[in-house]
Image (cartoon, rainbow, N blue to C red):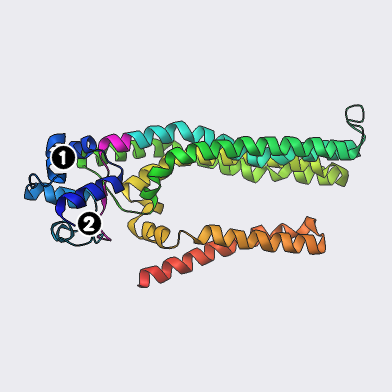
């Protein structure tokens, strides 16, 4: 494979058009076209830039053999692409937060319809308790489907930027300063919003305790209020935290340091596989014992255990 063929293959792999690649290299589109046709050869400084943009070694570009990716070369992200990502995250964070809010509050309709009917409410609306429960279930499914649709839509738009969470990002000094300024500006407000979200989540258990004190029959009321307040708290976390995580990923800082990105890339399969196993244990235990009031503890234990497993895996990666 000659140099021109390699440039074509790597350009398409990275999703760049000839115009976009030319812009990154500060050359004309015709120059890129000539390189790809082997009608001319790029200067040494352009070859260095090409190796950085495609994150491959210079030797790999120049030698007529297969392309060997260079593992530790940071991927260059131009200012225009950074701005496009930031703008998309700004637009999507509200909708993603709403989607998660809907997921959390979706069972409320089921609790209110079923629990309310058993206490003598809604008898003029529903013919039976089963019908009340079915209406609640329908509302639950509608809310979940809306949330899933939102997540799928914005997930597909953000998919091409997922690599910034797993690979080092290289920015120009101007772009880096721009991102750093935005991060510092939002951090002054971030602490207040985080504190608000945590406070709401902590206080959300009070209605549940009050409903239990009044009568166990009204537990569904306290549980519904609890879910609503938890949903509000999580909404704040997501809306407030999305941009902070984005800026840190671009700057290779915090939870998205180089070491953490290496961990995320190497063990990207871990969260999905782990929580599938936890859910399977929960369902198996619940259906075999019918003890739904207590089996939820599986998720609480699973969350703590997942944190411990993550720490152990990160420790083993650092030793290597």
State the residue in front, 3 or 247.
3
Instruction: Tell me, for residue 56, which label it has, or none.
Output: 2
Question: Residue 247 in the image: x percent, y percent?
Answer: 36, 42
Residue interval drawn in magenta = 70-83
**Residue ID at (26%, 41%):** 176
State the residue in front, 25 or 87.
25
**How dense is the environment of label 2, judged by Cα within 10 Å: few (below 14), some, or many (20 and up)?**
many
Q: For the image shown, how many numbered marks are present on the structure? A: 2
The alpha-carbon separation of the residues under discs 2 and 1 comes to 20 Å
Q: Which residue is mark 1?
A: 33
State the residue in front, 205 or 52.
52
**Residue ID at (51%, 33%):** 94
Q: Nearer the viewer, mark 2 or mark 1?
A: 1
**How dense is the environment of label 1, judged by Cα within 10 Å: few (below 14), some, or many (20 and up)?**
some
Question: Residue 34 in the image: x percent, y percent?
Answer: 12, 41
Say if 210 sits above or below 120 in the image.
below
Disc 2 is placed on an element classified as: loop
């Amino acid at each position: 494979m000659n140099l021109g063929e390699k440039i074509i293959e790597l350009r398409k792999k990275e999703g760049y058009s000839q115009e976009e690649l030319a812009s990154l290299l500060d050359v004309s589109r015709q120059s890129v076209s000539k390189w790809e046709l082997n009608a001319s050869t790029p200067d040494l400084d352009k070859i260095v830039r090409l190796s950085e943009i495609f994150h491959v070694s210079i030797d790999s570009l120049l030698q007529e053999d297969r392309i060997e990716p260079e593992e530790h070369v940071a991927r260059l992200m131009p200012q225009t692409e950074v701005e496009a990502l930031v703008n998309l995250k700004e637009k999507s964070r509200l909708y993603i937060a709403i989607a998660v809010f809907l997921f959390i509050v979706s069972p409320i309709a089921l609790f209110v319809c079923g629990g309310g009917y058993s206490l003598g409410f809604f008898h003029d609306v529903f013919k039976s308790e089963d019908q009340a429960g079915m209406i609640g279930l329908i509302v639950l499914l509608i809310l979940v489907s809306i949330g899933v649709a939102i997540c799928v839509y914005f997930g597909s738009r953000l998919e091409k930027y997922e690599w910034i969470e797993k690979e080092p990002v290289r920015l120009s000094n101007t772009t880096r300063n721009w991102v750093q300024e935005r991060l510092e500006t939002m951090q002054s407000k971030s602490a207040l919003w985080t504190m608000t979200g945590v406070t709401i989540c902590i206080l959300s258990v009070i209605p549940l305790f009050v409903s239990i004190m009044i009568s166990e029959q009204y537990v569904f009321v306290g549980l519904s209020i609890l879910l609503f307040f938890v949903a509000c708290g999580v909404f704040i976390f997501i809306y407030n935290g999305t941009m902070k995580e984005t800026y840190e990923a671009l700057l290779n800082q915090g939870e998205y340091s180089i070491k953490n990105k290496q961990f995320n890339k190497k063990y990207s399969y871990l969260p999905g596989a782990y929580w599938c196993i936890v859910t399977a244990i929960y369902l198996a235990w619940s259906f075999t014992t019918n003890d739904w009031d207590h089996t939820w503890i599986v998720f609480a234990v699973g969350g703590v255990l997942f944190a411990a497993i993550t720490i152990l895996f990160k420790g083993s990666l650092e030793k290597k």
